[in-house]
Image (cartoon, grey):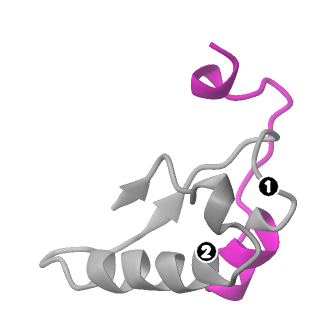
Amino acid sequence: MEIVYFGILPAFAGRGLGGWFLSEVCRIAWNVPGCRRVWLHTCADDSPAAVPNYLARGFVEYGRADTGCDACTA
């Protein structure tokens, strides 16, 4: 399973909803029959709270690039 775009609307930021939401998305992904891996993409345009949220949910940093996100900069 691949999470390419993940986030919450600015009106809901800072309420702890991002952690809950990501936990639910991961729970659903891992329950899909045949799922062996869940990975998530992020970019420099993400919230400063995003990476700590990802790490707290068990994700590990695999790689980093300075090229930016095509979807965010388009």
Under circle 1, the secondary element is loop
Under circle 2, the secondary element is helix
In the rendered view, tell whether residue 9 sits above or below residue 24: above
Residue sitting at x 53%, y 86%: 20
Q: Quadrant of residue 27?
A: bottom left
Residue sitting at x 30%, y 74%: 29
Q: List x then y, in percent, for residue 23.
A: 49, 85
Magenta span includes 69: yes
In the rendered view, tell whether residue 16 sits above or below residue 73: below
Q: List x then y, in percent, for residue 37.
A: 39, 71
- Boundaries of the magenta span: 51-74
In the displayed orientation, state which residue is furthest to the top. Answer: 74
Q: List x then y, in percent, for residue 57.
A: 62, 85
Residue type at numbered disc 1 = Ser
Number of numbered discs on residues:
2
Quadrant placement of the N terminus:
bottom left
From the image, tell me which residue sits under label 2. Answer: 18
Number of the label disc, if any, that sits on residue 72? none
Residue neighbourhood size for the residue with mark 1, other residues' Cα within 10 Å, grouped as few (<14), some (14–19), many (≥20): few
Quadrant placement of the C terminus:
top right
Residue type at numbered disc 2 = Gly
Q: Nearer the viewer, residue 27 or 65?
A: 27
From the image, tell me which residue sits under label 1. Answer: 47
State the separation of the CA atoms marked 2 and 1: 11 Å
Left or right, 34 with reference to 46? left
Q: Nearer the viewer, residue 51 or 60?
A: 51
Magenta span includes 16: no
Q: Are marks 2 and 1 in contact (CB under 8 Å)?
A: yes
